[in-house]
Amino acid sequence: MDARTDQSNLAGTRARAKAPAPDAPALLAWYDEHRRALPWRAMPGVRPDPYRVWLSEIMLQQTRVETVAPYFEKFLERWPDVQALAAAKLSEVLSAWAGLGYYARARNLHACASEIARRGGEFPRTEPKLRALPGIGAYTAAAVAAIAFEARTIAIDGNVERVVARLFALREPLPKAKAKLHALATRLQPEGRHGDFVQALMELGAIVCTPKKPDCPHCPWQGACAANALGEPERFPHKIGKKEGKLRRGAAFVVRREDGAVLLRTRPVKGLLGGMTEVPTSQWTHRFDDMLVLGQAPLRREWKRLPGTVRHIFTHFPLELIVLTARVKKKIRPPKGMRFVRQQDLHREALPTLMRKVLAHASRTIHPEGRAT
Ligand code: SF4
């Protein structure tokens, strides 16, 4: 521990010692006045629908509210309840999810809906029973139990972590401090309104106690906040830097038929981007050799390499793809396990963001007659 951190810890302890305890009624009163009207949030006095709560919590994992809102509306319009979602084909769900990322969520969403429908369509009401369902981890189980069923529990997402770490000027870095954060957040809980309290904590982190420039003067807990007393709220929470994985490289093969149809295939259901649609690609490896890549091409053709590359960041590694294109006659048969999809039908395909980037890159750099520029 360096001298500066040591000083800060002492100051944090003093700040916590002097500050009044944060009180739940103040936060709930703030929430009643300032809560955003979100498509999945029940109006005051209305009992939340567990299906909406669950669907939104799955979609919101690692994903921004503004991104999720149109997807949530689309899903609800198409599959208004858990039975309807369970009756959908997995390929339809993946296609509707395309662009939202972290596709294991969509596969688990479908599996979870099927399991709930099989049990009669009722969501379990307790955290342990919710956790036993596909795709529901500790956070989601707590959020659904609290928001939909008023369970006395705390759901800690990134927003709540930030608020609590700042309130107590927590010294331990994340992720080591998770258990301590949970214990501190639990101490703040009121006797009732458990669902609102969980949402109020999240809302405070989302719109007031933001990562940069928190709006402390408008925070209902300003007087009780140790990080604010220290004058350095942005220094919390401390985090141990996450290592970016090693770069993988590969090639994407964009084959266009003379009528514009594109050669696609479906990835295996298990694994990264499982069940999603892709243009054929080579393996993605750390030791990619672009001189040898044609051995992995889906067709023997004259391939043109487009200028530039497509980059994408997955959770555990960054990826860089070169893009090769070829043009084929309309009568050609697709290789086994692949299919040609017409331009006007592409929107029905479960194309993840990476593949959309590849196709956009190919469209930008391919001459209308099919020659690389
Ligand atoms: Fe966050 Fe500022 Fe409120 Fe503290 S006073 S909880 S730092 S917004």
Image (spheres, rainbow, N blue to C red):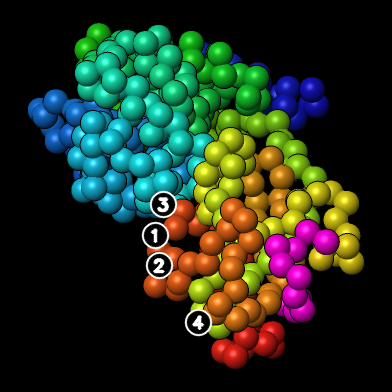
Mark with earlier residue (3, 1): 3
Q: Amino acid at mark 1?
A: Arg
Q: Report how far apart the C-alphas of labels 2 and 4 lie in the structure.
A: 13 Å
Q: Secondary structure at mark 2?
A: helix
Q: Is 186 contained in the magenta span?
A: no
The residue at 34%/22% (across/down) is: 115
> Which disc is residue 345 wearing?
2
Q: Report how far apart the C-alphas of labels 4 and 1 lie in the structure.
A: 18 Å
35 vs 371, nearest the viewer: 371
The residue at 63%/26% (across/down) is: 174
- What residue is disc 4 on? 259
**Classed neighbour count for the residue bearing mark 1: other residues with Cα under 10 Å, few (<14), some (14–19), many (≥20):** some
Most common SS among magenta residues: loop
Q: Is residue 53 left or right of residue 244?
A: left
Q: Report how far apart the C-alphas of labels 3 and 2 lie in the structure.
A: 12 Å
**Classed neighbour count for the residue bearing mark 3: other residues with Cα under 10 Å, few (<14), some (14–19), many (≥20):** many
Disc 1 + disc 2, Cβ < 8 Å = yes
The residue at 54%/70% (across/down) is: 262
- For the record, the magenta segment spans 295-307
Residue 367, located in which quarter of the rendered image? Answer: bottom right
Mark with earlier residue (4, 1): 4
Mark with earlier residue (4, 3): 3
Task: Report if the beta carbon of the residue with label 4 is closer than 8 angstroms to ligand 1.
Answer: no
Q: Is residue 279 left or right of residue 348?
A: right
- In x, y percent, where is residue 245? 76, 42
- In x, y percent, where is residue 361? 61, 73
Q: Secondary structure at mark 3?
A: helix
